[in-house]
Image: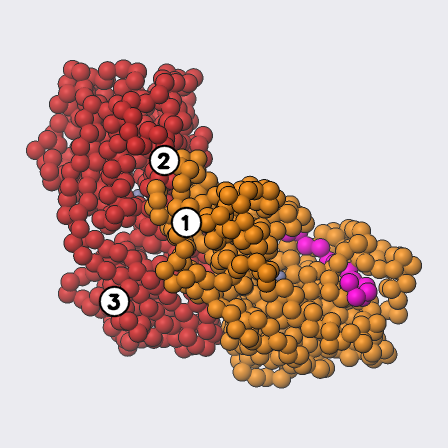
Chain colours: A orange, B red
Amino acid sequence: MNIWQGIIIGALFAPSVWAATTPASMDQDLAYQLVESLTVEVGPRIAGSEADRRAVQWALNKFTQLGYDKVWTEEFDMPGWTRGQASLEVVSPFAQPFVLTSLGGSVGTPKAGIRASVVMFDSIEALEKADAAAVKGKIVFINKPMTKDKSGSFYGQVVAARSRGAVEAAKLGAVAIVIRSVGTSNNRFAHTGTMKYDETIAKIPAVAISVPDAQNLAKMLERSSRVELKLQMENQLEKATSHNVIAEITGTEKPEEIVLISGHLDSWDQGTGALDDGAGVALVMATGALIKQKIKPKRTIRVVLYGNEEGGLLGARAYAAKHHKDLDKHVLAAESDFGAGRIWQIESRFGDKALPFAKELQQKLAHLDIALGGNSTYGGPDVSVLAQAGVPVVALSQDGTDYFDYHHTPNDTLDKIDPDSLKQNLQAWLIMTETVANSSVNLRH
Amino acid sequence: MNIWQGIIIGALFAPSVWAATTPASMDQDLAYQLVESLTVEVGPRIAGSEADRRAVQWALNKFTQLGYDKVWTEEFDMPGWTRGQASLEVVSPFAQPFVLTSLGGSVGTPKAGIRASVVMFDSIEALEKADAAAVKGKIVFINKPMTKDKSGSFYGQVVAARSRGAVEAAKLGAVAIVIRSVGTSNNRFAHTGTMKYDETIAKIPAVAISVPDAQNLAKMLERSSRVELKLQMENQLEKATSHNVIAEITGTEKPEEIVLISGHLDSWDQGTGALDDGAGVALVMATGALIKQKIKPKRTIRVVLYGNEEGGLLGARAYAAKHHKDLDKHVLAAESDFGAGRIWQIESRFGDKALPFAKELQQKLAHLDIALGGNSTYGGPDVSVLAQAGVPVVALSQDGTDYFDYHHTPNDTLDKIDPDSLKQNLQAWLIMTETVANSSVNLRH
Ligand SMILES: [Zn+2]
Ligand SMILES: [Zn+2]
Ligand SMILES: [Zn+2]
Ligand SMILES: [Zn+2]
């Protein structure tokens, strides 16, 4: 039993267009209600899109309804990438279509498509060692599988092919790159995610195929040394803007001291962005609102819903740039962006003298089966920008064993969230946030 | 231990274009090798398509390589349905796209699409009782979930909405029908399958959406009484032909007596047709071939790979029509068409005097954990046509608990087949088929 269990505090303020459609109640179900509202009423919301703008409006309305003291947006410029039609098929010798997705940011193909034979590599490291003669004029296929674990530690190893495979392949003269989806499921979904070009290297189209398709292609290559593919893809890039949405519960004693909790509002366009990062958005929105219902925190609780995390932390960088003079007043930053699994560990990045406070936090979370981790976390993708700027961070580490079964695929939908796990998350965020907001601890020392 | 375990009988005959790409060996892995070959080298093969013709060629070549005594095709005419582009999106108030698939045989929409508001029903029975006033001009949405079990017994209840939902909805003036996918998984795949029109009722487009999309749409309807959808779809229908592919191991003593074992060669186009029905095709092709390597069966073993099962048993009907004078020489018919799960039961449809033979078969299969079921099976979809014409049938019932997680979706791929389960299936098919082919039992009596 803890202080946050069972609170039920009536209905919402500030009726609006959203209130009529969202019978949220201010209790431990609030996070689930918020992520349900976001995924049902907005759905996918790729940064810079019209859906992104609706998501921003949704967030503004929700923050207002939830009784936050201040609510505002901060606009930033960004490259706006739009996914068009895409198809990838084996032309010969085993003609059949593949399930693919464009990687985020990829250029399209000429209208007639690109037709070429395939050369397979086990990893981007193997590609980097290849002879240009083996790659020139071909479609590179990187077929690296990913292993599951609680902390998603294999993601970094596999995602390199997605991030910079196009550059490495183009250096050797490849005409396109196809990667095996970065993910841990054998469901026939392709995993999207951002990729980068180098302005000095030719920009070639980059796509991912599902795990079963990658296995199929590998089996074709066992049978035939010349497997020809045809890729057609229509993507667009243009200037766009997006927004960070920010809301505060103003501190009573030290309003200038900011406890920042966050998630990212944008999502990839294939699913409805429930796990990534609807759950995180919902958790931090609910945390501030429920704390205000119960206490008047001494420090200000600032909830930041970053825009365009997926395109490369663009909202986070815009926030850090805009607020760089105030970063020393950020006493702590934390982010929820790893799905909706139970929290099993709290990690920190504090000054040495503040380490006892990490232990104090963990002790308050112990009844939720949360252990104490190390002191070297970057806190989460967006928050890492603040950590690098010296802001103390904590990470409430979620069990991500199944996260990469769904992540960045069409399968990232509301039904993948376990409401009980989300409640456990909410308890932890409430306790952690309230404790820091009501203390005067300096975590930098 | 049984007579079929561990046989390994060297390499294949009749080298051809396929032999170079298929290092099959004549042992208990043969069924897996065949389904791998079919899914990798041919892939999806919707009846009447160019891929269907390649599948027919694949089967002819394989039967020849496997040493069958006779191999031939039997052509039949059929309506050739081609899936075009399709999209379904919520226009208002919660704009977002859905994952859909056209039902097989559905008409398309006008080029501009169909835009209308949704009316939801829990089942086709509820739709049938509805007032035309509630349905006219709307898109009907049938949101009936499906439950899992070993024998797939809930399929029949749910599939009615797919088969005849369009007719029932059109009777009441609906402009299109959207059904919740017939399936047991919450993966975001839509389940296709054949549907029927009534020539006296308006033909409206019919699609399925994935389970998460159906849940999402239902939640939208809780929030708003007017949810507008836009459906665009381009399908085509034209005359086509397909083929049954037939091969025989000629009986030594009673060559005119036929033991027919079968599967269907066609598949839906979303997956690669591994479970439905590549596994069945592979099992019966392997069965005849491995029996010939070991014995000279007294009766003829005829392997039939039906064309166009998915469109409504068209190959099976063509076979029954063409062979109607010989059906009394068919001593038994059996089919494998329920995935690749372990066989747990043998059922029969024999004359009463032949019931002891069903028990005898089961005793020979008992070491594979196969129990004796009832005497009222129709044997399988295609074989049911023969059963109705009086041909005795058996069914080697597979555990289909997970079958409808994958069935008729993009997720029906090779990796969903457990090789060990497929070996157990092969053992059972070998024992059953050899026993009947080497006996002189009359199963009609
Ligand atoms: Zn994220
Ligand atoms: Zn992400
Ligand atoms: Zn079938
Ligand atoms: Zn089927």
Q: Are marks 2 and 1 in contact (CB under 8 Å)?
A: no
> From what the image shows, is residue A444 above or below residue B414?
below
**Protein chain holding label 1:** A
The magenta stretch spans residue A396: yes
Label 2 and label 3 in one chain: yes
The magenta stretch spans residue A412: no
Q: Are marks 1 and 3 in contact (CB under 8 Å)?
A: no
Disc 2 vs disc 3: which is toward the camera? Answer: 2
Residue visible at 58% across and 76% down in the picture: A241
Q: Which residue is mark 1?
A: A116
Residue at mark 3: C-beta within 8 A of ligand 4:
no
Q: Indicate the position of residue B219 as horizontal and vertical percent values.
A: 48, 68
Q: Which residue is mark 2?
A: B37
Q: Which residue is mark 3?
A: B204
Q: Indicate the position of residue B258 as horizontal and vertical percent values.
A: 17, 26
Closer to the camera, B320 or A380? A380
Residue visible at 43% across and 64% down in the picture: A234
> How far is mark 2 from mark 1, CA to CA?
23 Å
Type of residue at label 1? Ala
